[in-house]
Amino acid sequence: MILRSLIKEIIKESLEEKRKKRRHPRFRPPRNKKDNPCGKGFAPGAQTGVKTKMGPQSGRRVSNCEKINEADPKVGTGKKPKGSGRRLYTDENPKDTVRVKFSSASAIQKTLAKKSFKSKSHKRQSQIINLIHQRARAAYKNAKDPATKKRLKRAYEYAEKRKEASKRKTQRMRKKKWE
């Protein structure tokens, strides 16, 4: 009796194992998350951003495989406007970074006196000065509190003064180049 029940249990277990091993003829084992379901040179939603679509024949969801444009940024690195070589919202060269403060004229003076600012080329310095000018102007225009507005006005005027000085230096350098 005990022997029969043991044999039945063993047979039952072996049948369950066989059922588990048997798969549908079109079964594909799941890939790793790192594997690309589209193959080399293609990725789901590489251009449109839509990763899946309805399959034309099967009517089921399938990967929306699109050719990878090498100029496109990798996922998570910011948007790249068409026709531009730079990405938005991304610090492409962290070594080139200058921490900028524009809350007051003295903060701008300290920013422009930094070694990290002075070590840059004139072209890069002009870009940084222009950025400070734009941000100071926007902050001044959006300020509501009279004391804050007064402080930001001084900062904006100082930034404008430095921007004009930078323009004059650029003109001198261009004139010198042509001579």
Image (tube, rainbow, N blue to C red):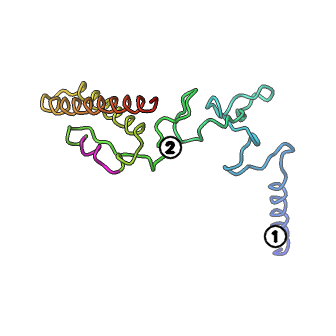
Q: Residue 69 or 113: which is nearer the viewer?
A: 113
The image position of residue 132, as x and y in percent, is: 31, 35
Q: Relative to residue 108, is residue 98 drawn left or right?
A: right
Q: Quadrant of residue 133?
A: top left
Residue projecting furthest to the left: 147
Which dot, 1 or 2, sits closer to the camera? 2
Q: Residue 41 or 165: which is nearer the viewer?
A: 165
Q: Residue 112 or 46: which is nearer the viewer?
A: 112
Q: State whether the magenta stretch is mostly helix, strand or loop.
A: helix
Residue in the picture at 61% in, 32% down = 49
Residue in the picture at 70% in, 51% down = 32
Quarter of the image where the C terminus is located = top left
Residue projecting furthest to the right: 25
Q: Which residue is denoted by mark 1 in the rendering?
A: 5
Q: Which residues are magenta?
A: 109-115
Q: Quadrant of residue 140?
A: top left
The image position of residue 43, as x and y in percent, is: 69, 38
Which element is circle 2 on?
Answer: loop
Q: Which residue is denoted by mark 2 in the rendering?
A: 92
Residue type for callout 2: Glu
The image position of residue 171, as x and y in percent, is: 37, 28
- The answer to whether residue 114 is magenta is yes
Q: Would you call the spot at circle 2 few (<14 residues within 10 Å), some (14-19), or many (20 or more)?
A: few
Residue type for callout 1: Ser
Which element is circle 1 on?
Answer: helix
Residue in the picture at 73% in, 38% down = 42
